[in-house]
Amino acid sequence: MNRIFYFIIISICFYACKPGIPKDIIQPDKMQQVLIDIHLVDGYISTLPSLDTAKKVGSSFYKGIYKKYDIDSAIYNTSINYYYKHPDLMKKMYDSISVKLS
């Protein structure tokens, strides 16, 4: 009986410690879409002649992206920092992003 109990406890611990992306981080599929939109906005902003115009337009576009994906700048920054610390995940996302943007 004790062996079964210990087996169940160890199994629960093993599955509970499963590595993965934390829930407070934007998941990779959604993050790819956010980054695609961010890069499209960055590309558009780089074509604007005035720095003041670029700041105003950029700010409103970024807010629109955050609203579209139901996130805010804090969640985005936390997520992008997480992916910077996990370059294998970042590379995987950018491989897909570069194909989609080509």
Image: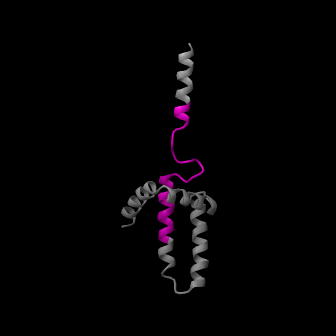
Residue for point 61% across, 58% down: 75
Q: Nearer the viewer, residue 18 or 76?
A: 18
Magenta stretch in the rendered image: 13-40
Q: Quadrant of residue 66?
A: bottom right
The magenta stretch spans residue 21: yes
Up-down relation of residue 86 to residue 41 (above or below): above
Farthest residue in the top direction?
Answer: 1
Q: In the figure, 68 relative to 12: above or below?
A: below
Position of 21 relative to 40 (above/below): above
Is 17 magenta? The answer is yes
Query: What quarter of the picture does the N terminus occupy?
Result: top right
Question: Where is residue 54, by image quadrant?
Answer: bottom right
Colour logic: one colour
From the top left corner, tell me how far across and down residue 92 is, in percent.
Answer: 41, 56
Q: Is residue 92 left or right of residue 59?
A: left
Percent coordinates x, y for residue 80 in the rendering: 54, 60
Residue at x 49%, y 63% (from the top left corner): 35
Residue 55 picture location, percent across and down: 60, 78
- Work out whether 57 lies above or below 15: below
Which residue is found at the position 56% from the left and 86% from the top?
50
Q: How many marks can you see?
A: 0
Residue nearest the viewer, comparing 98 with 44: 98
Residue at screen point 52% across, 51% down: 27
Instruction: Quadrant for the C terminus, please.
Output: bottom left
In the current view of this chain or complex, which residue is farthest to the bottom?
49
Q: Main secondary structure of the magenta part?
A: helix
